[in-house]
Structure formats: structure tokens, C-alpha cells
Amino acid sequence: MPQRMFRSFQGLLLAGLSLLFVFKAVNGQLTWYINSRFIPLTILGMVFLAVLAQAVFSEIRRSRKHEQDHPEHYHEHGHAPSATSLWVMLIPLAIGIAIPARPLDSSAFDSKGFNTSAPLVSSDISAQIFETESEERNILDWLKLFNYEEDVIQFVGQKASVVGFVYFDATLDKDQFYVSRFVISCCAADGFAIAMPVQWSQADALQQDAWVAVKGKIEAITLNGSRVPLIVAESVEAVETPDQPYLFP
């Protein structure tokens, strides 16, 4: 492959990767892949890719100008690197374009499983969670409380209001389902699912993976030998997928 052609493809791929990240940032999809604390580094990466693309195109323009100004002396020197390096950039770009972005859902449960406790999460639940109004606690907050507090009876009867997606499991009763979320520390690849059981008389009317807002009162039940919070639902309402579908430890 001629060196100028190689550089042209290289510049286009660099620019394409930068635009792909910009598109996902503008559409709020970056946090479907990574923890929000890495967004500044990702933005820096976008700028870096754009600068590299601009440098490559500038080199091509200088080369063409030199050829036009001195056609009798111009010839390409050397050979372009192996086209393999282009594939390294093309493959992630093609995957990013071809595969629609979506947050993790119950289809990932088969490979990742799910937990009704709070594994891999710091045991520091401090006064912040206790001071938080019960209806402002998310699924992870409730699991932390039940996982690290010996006296869970103190939480029975408290009001809960959580948002998550529906997951049906054969081990639950017909009027029960799990309200679930994924927790990620770094990126979606290390995400793990957490879930709270919900008891609701109309559970069979719900669809798997539908996002719902569940309101009700907390009860304590035993699942797989552990005490976990169950929401006795007073209402279950369909909601849109949150702008940030993941929780962070």
C-alpha cells in the first residue's frame, strides 16, 4: 500500500474514532460503558485523537503541495507500515457503529449472575445512608444496609422508592419479581447485577427488562441463607430508562 494512501486511511480512522466518542458523549451514552469519573479522561482522549487526525491530514497536504511545486523531484520514500495497524483502529470503530448502544440488562445475568447482597462494595456505610430518607435510598443502599447491619429489624416497615429493571426468577413466587440494577466500578465489563425482591399482586403483568419505579414498605426475608430486603409494593409504575442506568459503589 502506498504511504500516502496508508496515511489517508489512518487519518480517516482517527477522525472517525474521535467523532464516534463525541457522538456517544453528546447522546449521554458514554456512561453506558464507563464510570462517570472517567469522563474527563475520555474527553481528553477525543481531543487527542482529533489532534492526531489533523496532524496526519496536514502531513498529506504538505506532501501533495511539495509534489505540485516540484513534480520533477517528487517521489514517495519508503513503504507504509503494515495495514494490520489500520485494522486495529477499524475494528473498534466498526463495532461502535454497527452495534447499537444499550445498557446492560438481564441478558447479561447468564454470564455475570446477580446478587441480593452487595459484593465487592466497601463496608463503609457511614452515617450518610442512615441519615438519608428511606425513600431516597437506591437498591444498592438497601443492600448495603442489610449486608452490613446485624439488626435489620430496624428497617422493617420503612418506606422504599427505587428504580430498576424487572427480572423474573424461577425461585420466586408468582407474585414476586426482582427490581435490578448493574453496579460498575470502572467499566461495563466489570459490572455486576444487584437485585431486590418485590412482592406485587400484578407482577405477572410486567415485562422482563422493563424499567419500573417501585414504591412500598420494606420487609426482611431469607434468601439463600441471607437476610435481604423485600419491598411489599404499593405501586409499580413503568418509567423510561434513566439517563444513568448504572449505580456506582
Image (cartoon, rainbow, N blue to C red):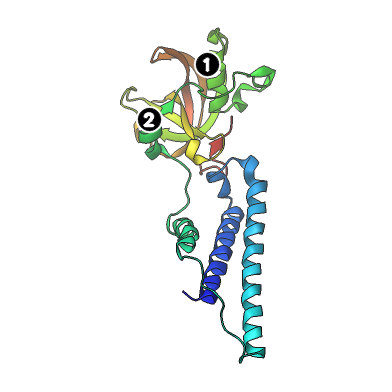
The label shown at residue 123 is: none
Residue depth check, mark 2 versus mark 1: number of the one nearer the observer: 1
N-terminal label among 2 and 1? 1
Q: Nearer the viewer, residue 66 or 157?
A: 66
Q: Is residue 1 left or right of residue 205?
A: right
Vertical placement of residue 60 versus 136, above or below: below
Query: How far apart, in angstroms, are the residues tagged by discs 2 and 1?
Result: 26 Å
In percent of the image, x 57 and y 77: which residue is there?
A: 77
Which residue corresponds to the image point at 64% horizontal and 63% vertical from the top-left? 52
Which residue of the protein is positioned furthest toward the bottom in this rendering?
Answer: 72
The residue singled out by tag 1 in the image is 147
Asked where in the image residue 74 lies, by quadrant, the reply is: bottom right
Give the class, few, some or many, for how many residues have Cα within 10 Å of label 1's Cα (few <14, many ≥20).
Answer: some
List x then y, in percent, for residue 193. Answer: 46, 31
In the picture, which quadrant includes the C terminus? top right
Instruction: Name the one closer to the observer, 225 or 176.
Output: 225
Given residues 249 and 54, the one toward you in this image is: 54
- The answer to whether residue 140 shows anywhere in this view is yes
Which element is circle 1 on? helix
From what the image shows, is residue 125 above or below residue 74? Answer: above
Instruction: Specify the amino acid type for callout 1.
Output: Asn
Q: Nearer the viewer, residue 2 or 108?
A: 2
Looking at the image, can residue 238 be seen?
no
Residue 108 locus on image (x, y percent): 40, 38
SS for dot 2: helix
Give the residue at mark 2: 203
Identify residue type, mark 2: Ala
